[in-house]
Amino acid sequence: MSEAVLRTEALRKNFGSLEVARDISLALPRGCRHALIGPNGAGKTTLINLITGQLRPDAGTIKLEGEDITAALVAARVRKGLTRTFQINTLFPDLTPLEAVTLAICERERVAAQFWRGLASQGAIVDESIAILERLGLGNAATRVTRTLPYGQQRLLEIALALATRPKVLLLDEPAAGVPKDESAMLFDVIAALPDDISVLFIEHDMDIVFRFATQIIVMVSGGILLEADPQTVRDDPRVREVYLGSGHG
Ligand SMILES: Nc1ncnc2c1ncn2[C@@H]1O[C@H](COP(=O)(O)OP(=O)(O)OP(=O)(O)O)[C@@H](O)[C@H]1O
């Protein structure tokens, strides 16, 4: 796990006079399951947006497997293997998971036009699609219409769609948001069991989940990294307790 797949160096971003990213330097090792935590407004989503290219940094660099991608467009980063989950409600609620994942693979292969000729003509792609859905425990839901699926399964489908891009780095912004607590642990079981060549960085507010699933925790406060350490060290750090965990946690 020592080789960094993704590296940011001294990333900076201001919104007017508000510093939302202050010298963010971090490295994601291959296969990691890192959590990004911090109080509301700390800059977690902004950092994900900077990494994926939705936002441009004012300074600093982002490297994927050593290649400087700081100026690359979002779609180019996805093609290189840097992916975040999509919001399902903006996608195709009337498609089945099998259709949606197949379409995503067709997009990756730049054969999207063929998708509309029907699934029957897409043998290898459909096989890959089924394999992804089964990996995420969605095999039985593959041919149901997405909008009729339980919310937890819809969130899993978001991850399935991200997997269709063959990510090296997967960025998950609150992947279990809105999912009941017992189901969110199941969802994170699936995330933990993703192929170990995929590096995962996830934002999560539920500390039980964070301490259970993260191999390393990055704590952000006011646009900067307060601490990056293993869960036990983060749990024991008085600064973290003070600024983030507060009473009733840890
Ligand atoms: N487009 C924008 N323009 C101006 N300010 C913004 C913009 N986006 C975010 N902010 C501000 O930047 C700060 C960081 O926001 P961000 O959403 O990154 O925090 P966060 O740590 O993800 O918070 P939360 O846990 O509440 O999602 C906040 O003060 C927010 O109000």
Image (tube, grey):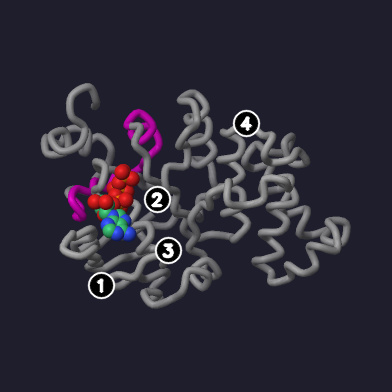
Q: According to the image, label 2 marks what residue?
A: 201
Indicate the amino acid at tag 2: Leu
Which corner quadrant of the image does residue 5 belong to? bottom left
Which segment did they paint magenta?
207-225
Name the image quarter holding the N terminus: bottom left
In percent of width and height, residue 87 lies at 53, 49
Which residue lies at the image location 61% right of the left edge and 48% below the top edge? 160
Asked whether mark 4 lies closer than 8 Å to ligand 1, one says no
| Residue 194, percent from left and from top | 54, 46
Of marks 3 and 2, the one in the foreground: 3
Secondary structure beneath dot 3 equals helix
Alpha-carbon span between mark 3 and mark 4: 28 Å
Q: Earlier in the sequence, mark 1 or mark 3?
A: 3
The residue indicated by pointer 3 is 52
Task: Answer few, some or many: residues within 10 Å of disc 2's Cα (few below 14, many 20 plus, some between 14 and 19).
Answer: many
Marks 1,4: beta carbons within 8 A: no
Instruction: Give the residue displayed 12% in from the left and 39% down from the top.
Output: 239
Any mark on residue 232, and which? none
Residue 40 screen position, x and y as percent: 26, 42
In three-dimensional space, the C-alpha distance between marks 2 and 1, rounded to whole angstroms, equals 22 Å
Give the position of the C terminus as an image quadrant.
top left
Earlier sequence position, callout 2 versus callout 4:
4
Q: What residue is disc 1 on?
A: 58
- Could you tell me the amino acid type at mark 1? Asp
- Give the residue number, with chain letter if any, for mark 4: 150
User: Does 39 sit above or below residue 180?
Assistant: below
Q: Residue furthest front?
A: 16
Q: Nearer the viewer, mark 2 or mark 1?
A: 1
Q: Earlier in the sequence, mark 3 or mark 4?
A: 3
Q: Is residue 37 left or right of residue 69?
A: left
Q: Amino acid at mark 4?
A: Pro
